Amino acid sequence: MTELLFNPDAWIALLTLTFLEIILGIDNIVFLSIVSGKLPQSEQPKARRIGLILAMVFRIILLFGITWVLSLQNVLFHIDWGFFKAGITGQSLIIFGGGLFLLYKSVTEIHHKLEGSEDSEAGKASNTLSSAVIQIAALNLVFSFDSILTAVGLISMKSPAEGGFGYEGALVIMILSIIISIIIMMIFAGPVSKFVNEHPTIQILGLSFLILIGVMLLAEGGHLAHMAFFGGTEVNSIPKGYLYFSIFFSLFVEFLNLRMKKSKNPVKLHNNKIIDKSLEDTDITN
Protein backbone atom coordinates (compact mmCIF):
# COMPACT_ATOMS: atom_id res chain seq x y z
CA MET A 1 0.00 0.00 0.00
CA THR A 2 2.84 2.41 0.80
CA GLU A 3 4.42 1.76 -2.58
CA LEU A 4 1.07 2.37 -4.25
CA LEU A 5 0.63 5.67 -2.38
CA PHE A 6 3.90 7.07 -3.72
CA ASN A 7 3.56 5.60 -7.20
CA PRO A 8 2.79 8.36 -9.77
CA ASP A 9 1.40 5.78 -12.20
CA ALA A 10 -1.13 4.70 -9.57
CA TRP A 11 -2.35 8.29 -9.13
CA ILE A 12 -2.63 8.75 -12.90
CA ALA A 13 -4.56 5.48 -13.16
CA LEU A 14 -6.87 6.57 -10.31
CA LEU A 15 -7.60 9.96 -11.92
CA THR A 16 -8.12 8.42 -15.35
CA LEU A 17 -10.44 5.72 -14.07
CA THR A 18 -12.39 8.20 -11.91
CA PHE A 19 -12.92 10.42 -14.95
CA LEU A 20 -14.10 7.46 -17.01
CA GLU A 21 -16.46 6.34 -14.23
CA ILE A 22 -18.03 9.82 -14.19
CA ILE A 23 -18.40 9.85 -17.99
CA LEU A 24 -19.92 6.36 -17.96
CA GLY A 25 -22.18 7.48 -15.10
CA ILE A 26 -23.79 10.27 -17.14
CA ASP A 27 -26.43 7.89 -18.50
CA ASN A 28 -27.06 6.74 -14.92
CA ILE A 29 -27.67 10.32 -13.75
CA VAL A 30 -29.99 11.02 -16.71
CA PHE A 31 -32.02 7.91 -15.90
CA LEU A 32 -32.09 8.87 -12.20
CA SER A 33 -33.31 12.36 -13.09
CA ILE A 34 -36.12 11.07 -15.30
CA VAL A 35 -37.32 8.40 -12.85
CA SER A 36 -37.00 10.49 -9.68
CA GLY A 37 -38.67 13.46 -11.42
CA LYS A 38 -41.98 11.55 -11.34
CA LEU A 39 -41.87 11.30 -7.54
CA PRO A 40 -43.09 13.91 -5.03
CA GLN A 41 -40.53 16.65 -4.46
CA SER A 42 -39.74 15.43 -0.94
CA GLU A 43 -38.84 11.91 -2.14
CA GLN A 44 -36.68 12.84 -5.13
CA PRO A 45 -33.38 13.39 -3.21
CA LYS A 46 -33.90 10.08 -1.38
CA ALA A 47 -34.43 8.22 -4.67
CA ARG A 48 -31.26 9.75 -6.16
CA ARG A 49 -29.20 8.87 -3.08
CA ILE A 50 -30.48 5.30 -3.03
CA GLY A 51 -29.82 4.95 -6.75
CA LEU A 52 -26.22 6.16 -6.54
CA ILE A 53 -25.49 4.15 -3.39
CA LEU A 54 -26.83 1.05 -5.15
CA ALA A 55 -24.54 1.81 -8.10
CA MET A 56 -21.55 2.00 -5.76
CA VAL A 57 -22.48 -1.17 -3.86
CA PHE A 58 -23.08 -3.18 -7.04
CA ARG A 59 -19.74 -2.11 -8.50
CA ILE A 60 -17.74 -2.90 -5.37
CA ILE A 61 -19.44 -6.30 -4.95
CA LEU A 62 -18.70 -7.14 -8.58
CA LEU A 63 -15.07 -6.12 -8.10
CA PHE A 64 -14.66 -8.59 -5.24
CA GLY A 65 -16.29 -11.21 -7.44
CA ILE A 66 -14.25 -10.29 -10.50
CA THR A 67 -13.41 -13.95 -11.19
CA TRP A 68 -17.13 -14.73 -11.42
CA VAL A 69 -17.73 -11.64 -13.61
CA LEU A 70 -15.02 -12.73 -16.03
CA SER A 71 -16.47 -16.27 -16.07
CA LEU A 72 -19.66 -14.80 -17.54
CA GLN A 73 -17.71 -14.41 -20.78
CA ASN A 74 -17.78 -18.19 -21.19
CA VAL A 75 -20.27 -19.55 -23.73
CA LEU A 76 -23.38 -21.07 -22.13
CA PHE A 77 -24.92 -22.51 -25.31
CA HIS A 78 -24.77 -22.14 -29.08
CA ILE A 79 -27.53 -21.25 -31.53
CA ASP A 80 -27.34 -22.29 -35.18
CA TRP A 81 -30.48 -21.69 -37.24
CA GLY A 82 -28.71 -21.40 -40.57
CA PHE A 83 -29.51 -17.72 -41.11
CA PHE A 84 -28.58 -16.86 -37.49
CA LYS A 85 -25.67 -18.06 -35.36
CA ALA A 86 -24.61 -17.05 -31.84
CA GLY A 87 -22.67 -18.25 -28.83
CA ILE A 88 -24.71 -16.97 -25.88
CA THR A 89 -22.76 -15.93 -22.77
CA GLY A 90 -23.98 -14.76 -19.37
CA GLN A 91 -22.46 -11.34 -20.01
CA SER A 92 -24.20 -10.95 -23.39
CA LEU A 93 -27.57 -11.89 -21.84
CA ILE A 94 -27.20 -9.25 -19.11
CA ILE A 95 -26.06 -6.52 -21.51
CA PHE A 96 -28.70 -7.38 -24.13
CA GLY A 97 -31.46 -7.53 -21.51
CA GLY A 98 -30.37 -4.16 -20.13
CA GLY A 99 -30.52 -2.65 -23.60
CA LEU A 100 -34.07 -3.95 -24.13
CA PHE A 101 -35.15 -2.59 -20.74
CA LEU A 102 -33.62 0.82 -21.46
CA LEU A 103 -35.29 1.02 -24.89
CA TYR A 104 -38.66 0.04 -23.41
CA LYS A 105 -38.38 2.49 -20.53
CA SER A 106 -37.20 5.40 -22.69
CA VAL A 107 -39.90 4.99 -25.36
CA THR A 108 -42.58 4.56 -22.66
CA GLU A 109 -41.43 7.71 -20.85
CA ILE A 110 -41.48 9.75 -24.07
CA HIS A 111 -45.01 8.51 -24.76
CA HIS A 112 -46.14 9.41 -21.24
CA LYS A 113 -44.64 12.88 -21.38
CA LEU A 114 -46.10 13.74 -24.77
CA GLU A 115 -49.46 11.97 -24.47
CA GLY A 116 -50.14 12.63 -20.78
CA SER A 117 -50.64 8.98 -19.84
CA GLU A 118 -49.05 9.63 -16.43
CA ASP A 119 -52.27 11.23 -15.27
CA SER A 120 -54.08 7.89 -15.43
CA GLU A 121 -54.52 5.70 -12.35
CA ALA A 122 -51.97 3.20 -13.69
CA GLY A 123 -49.46 5.98 -14.15
CA LYS A 124 -50.00 7.30 -10.64
CA ALA A 125 -49.65 3.83 -9.17
CA SER A 126 -46.21 3.44 -10.71
CA ASN A 127 -44.92 6.77 -9.37
CA THR A 128 -43.78 5.42 -6.01
CA LEU A 129 -40.39 5.34 -4.34
CA SER A 130 -40.27 1.53 -4.31
CA SER A 131 -41.10 1.37 -8.02
CA ALA A 132 -38.41 3.95 -8.80
CA VAL A 133 -35.81 2.10 -6.70
CA ILE A 134 -36.58 -1.22 -8.45
CA GLN A 135 -36.14 0.38 -11.88
CA ILE A 136 -32.93 2.12 -10.81
CA ALA A 137 -31.53 -1.08 -9.29
CA ALA A 138 -32.27 -3.10 -12.44
CA LEU A 139 -30.47 -0.65 -14.69
CA ASN A 140 -27.64 -0.09 -12.21
CA LEU A 141 -26.83 -3.79 -12.39
CA VAL A 142 -26.29 -3.55 -16.16
CA PHE A 143 -24.31 -0.32 -15.93
CA SER A 144 -22.19 -1.86 -13.16
CA PHE A 145 -21.12 -4.77 -15.38
CA ASP A 146 -20.14 -2.35 -18.15
CA SER A 147 -18.26 -0.11 -15.70
CA ILE A 148 -16.35 -2.97 -14.04
CA LEU A 149 -15.29 -4.56 -17.33
CA THR A 150 -14.01 -1.15 -18.48
CA ALA A 151 -12.05 -0.74 -15.22
CA VAL A 152 -10.55 -4.23 -15.41
CA GLY A 153 -9.48 -3.60 -18.99
CA LEU A 154 -7.77 -0.34 -18.00
CA ILE A 155 -6.01 -1.26 -14.73
CA SER A 156 -3.27 -3.87 -14.96
CA MET A 157 -3.41 -6.64 -12.33
CA LYS A 158 0.08 -7.85 -13.17
CA SER A 159 2.67 -7.88 -10.41
CA PRO A 160 4.72 -4.68 -9.85
CA ALA A 161 7.75 -6.53 -11.21
CA GLU A 162 5.87 -6.96 -14.50
CA GLY A 163 4.84 -3.31 -14.67
CA GLY A 164 1.41 -3.65 -13.07
CA PHE A 165 -0.12 -2.82 -9.68
CA GLY A 166 -0.78 -6.38 -8.49
CA TYR A 167 -4.24 -7.76 -7.70
CA GLU A 168 -4.64 -5.94 -4.37
CA GLY A 169 -3.24 -2.67 -5.72
CA ALA A 170 -5.51 -2.73 -8.77
CA LEU A 171 -8.50 -3.54 -6.54
CA VAL A 172 -7.74 -0.59 -4.25
CA ILE A 173 -7.44 1.79 -7.23
CA MET A 174 -10.72 0.60 -8.75
CA ILE A 175 -12.63 0.79 -5.45
CA LEU A 176 -11.30 4.30 -4.72
CA SER A 177 -12.22 5.48 -8.23
CA ILE A 178 -15.77 4.14 -7.79
CA ILE A 179 -16.22 5.80 -4.38
CA ILE A 180 -14.81 9.16 -5.56
CA SER A 181 -16.89 9.16 -8.76
CA ILE A 182 -20.11 8.31 -6.88
CA ILE A 183 -19.47 11.09 -4.34
CA ILE A 184 -18.96 13.59 -7.19
CA MET A 185 -22.14 12.36 -8.91
CA MET A 186 -24.06 12.69 -5.62
CA ILE A 187 -22.97 16.32 -5.36
CA PHE A 188 -24.12 17.16 -8.88
CA ALA A 189 -27.13 14.81 -9.16
CA GLY A 190 -29.48 17.29 -7.45
CA PRO A 191 -28.69 20.33 -9.63
CA VAL A 192 -28.62 18.18 -12.78
CA SER A 193 -32.00 16.62 -11.96
CA LYS A 194 -33.50 20.03 -11.20
CA PHE A 195 -32.21 21.42 -14.49
CA VAL A 196 -33.44 18.40 -16.48
CA ASN A 197 -36.91 18.45 -14.92
CA GLU A 198 -37.32 22.20 -15.42
CA HIS A 199 -36.59 22.03 -19.17
CA PRO A 200 -38.85 19.76 -21.24
CA THR A 201 -36.50 19.79 -24.23
CA ILE A 202 -33.67 18.51 -22.01
CA GLN A 203 -35.96 15.74 -20.74
CA ILE A 204 -36.76 14.57 -24.28
CA LEU A 205 -33.10 14.92 -25.26
CA GLY A 206 -32.08 12.87 -22.22
CA LEU A 207 -34.57 10.14 -23.08
CA SER A 208 -33.26 10.16 -26.65
CA PHE A 209 -29.76 9.64 -25.24
CA LEU A 210 -31.05 6.65 -23.27
CA ILE A 211 -32.47 5.20 -26.50
CA LEU A 212 -29.03 5.58 -28.08
CA ILE A 213 -27.40 3.91 -25.08
CA GLY A 214 -30.01 1.12 -25.24
CA VAL A 215 -29.15 0.51 -28.91
CA MET A 216 -25.45 0.53 -27.99
CA LEU A 217 -26.09 -2.10 -25.29
CA LEU A 218 -28.02 -4.27 -27.76
CA ALA A 219 -25.16 -4.06 -30.26
CA GLU A 220 -22.60 -4.78 -27.53
CA GLY A 221 -24.62 -7.76 -26.29
CA GLY A 222 -24.84 -9.10 -29.84
CA HIS A 223 -21.13 -8.58 -30.34
CA LEU A 224 -20.27 -10.38 -27.09
CA ALA A 225 -22.44 -13.31 -28.21
CA HIS A 226 -20.78 -13.25 -31.67
CA MET A 227 -24.18 -13.01 -33.34
CA ALA A 228 -23.96 -13.48 -37.11
CA PHE A 229 -26.69 -13.20 -39.74
CA PHE A 230 -26.98 -14.74 -43.19
CA GLY A 231 -23.73 -16.61 -43.40
CA GLY A 232 -21.24 -14.49 -41.53
CA THR A 233 -22.34 -10.85 -41.15
CA GLU A 234 -21.39 -10.46 -37.49
CA VAL A 235 -22.84 -7.81 -35.19
CA ASN A 236 -20.26 -5.20 -34.19
CA SER A 237 -20.25 -3.04 -31.07
CA ILE A 238 -20.73 0.73 -31.32
CA PRO A 239 -17.66 2.71 -30.14
CA LYS A 240 -18.60 4.61 -26.96
CA GLY A 241 -16.55 7.62 -28.10
CA TYR A 242 -18.89 8.27 -31.04
CA LEU A 243 -21.92 7.97 -28.81
CA TYR A 244 -20.71 10.29 -26.07
CA PHE A 245 -19.47 12.84 -28.61
CA SER A 246 -22.96 13.01 -30.13
CA ILE A 247 -24.46 13.38 -26.64
CA PHE A 248 -22.16 16.26 -25.63
CA PHE A 249 -22.55 17.97 -29.01
CA SER A 250 -26.36 17.76 -28.75
CA LEU A 251 -26.26 19.16 -25.22
CA PHE A 252 -24.02 22.01 -26.37
CA VAL A 253 -26.47 22.92 -29.14
CA GLU A 254 -29.40 22.73 -26.74
CA PHE A 255 -27.64 24.98 -24.20
CA LEU A 256 -27.17 27.55 -26.97
CA ASN A 257 -30.87 27.28 -27.82
CA LEU A 258 -31.83 27.74 -24.17
CA ARG A 259 -29.73 30.88 -23.89
CA MET A 260 -31.27 32.32 -27.05
CA LYS A 261 -34.81 31.53 -25.88
CA LYS A 262 -34.32 32.39 -22.23
CA SER A 263 -36.91 35.16 -22.31
CA LYS A 264 -39.61 32.87 -23.70
CA ASN A 265 -41.88 30.61 -21.69
CA PRO A 266 -41.28 26.91 -22.51
CA VAL A 267 -44.15 24.52 -23.05
CA LYS A 268 -44.40 22.14 -20.09
CA LEU A 269 -44.74 18.39 -20.52
CA HIS A 270 -47.67 16.53 -18.98
CA ASN A 271 -45.86 15.34 -15.87
CA ASN A 272 -44.92 18.88 -14.82
CA LYS A 273 -48.45 19.82 -13.68
CA ILE A 274 -47.94 23.32 -15.15
CA ILE A 275 -49.33 24.22 -18.53
CA ASP A 276 -47.89 26.66 -21.01
CA LYS A 277 -48.01 30.11 -19.44
CA SER A 278 -49.47 31.50 -22.63
CA LEU A 279 -52.60 29.45 -21.82
CA GLU A 280 -52.93 30.71 -18.24
CA ASP A 281 -54.41 34.03 -19.34
CA THR A 282 -56.82 32.40 -21.78
CA ASP A 283 -60.47 32.56 -20.73
CA ILE A 284 -61.43 28.88 -20.92
CA THR A 285 -65.09 29.81 -20.55
CA ASN A 286 -65.10 31.40 -24.02
Image: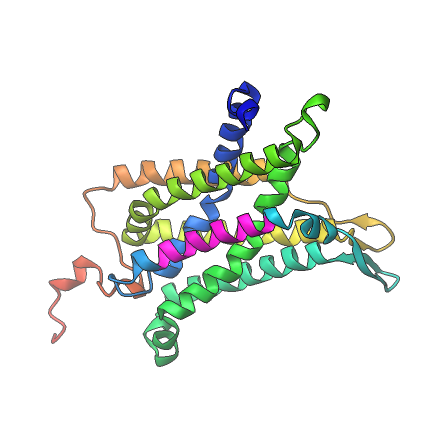
- Residue 207: image quadrant is bottom left
Location of residue 85 in the rendering, given as x and y in whole percent from the top left corner: 83, 58
When the figure is inspected, residue 246 is found, relative to residue 46, above or below; the finding is above
When the figure is inspected, residue 144 is found, relative to residue 119, above or below; the finding is above
Identify the residue shown where x is 40% and y is 40%: 251
Left or right? Give the position of 234 relative to 273. Answer: right
Residue 69 visible here = yes
Left or right? Give the position of 136 relative to 171. Answer: left
Q: Nearer the viewer, residue 277 or 118?
A: 118
Q: Nearer the viewer, residue 122 or 175?
A: 175
Q: Quadrant of the N terminus?
A: top right
Left or right? Give the position of 175 relative to 276. Answer: right
Identify the residue shown where x is 34% and y is 78%: 120
Secondary structure mostly seen in the magenta stretch: helix
Question: Bounds of the magenta span?
Answer: 47-62
> Does the magenta run of residues contain 52?
yes
Location of residue 262 in the rendering, given as x and y in whole percent from the top left corner: 22, 42
Identify the residue shown where x is 32% and y is 39%: 257
Location of residue 32 in the rendering, given as x and y in whole percent from the top left corner: 40, 55
> Does the magenta run of residues contain 183?
no
- Residue, far bottom: 121
Identify the residue shown where x is 39% and y is 73%: 126
Location of residue 48 in the rendering, given as x and y in whole percent from the top left corner: 36, 55
Residue 246 visible here = no
Q: Nearer the viewer, residue 263 or 16?
A: 16
Q: Which color scheme is applied?
A: rainbow
Q: Quadrant of the C terminus?
A: bottom left
- Residue, far front: 2
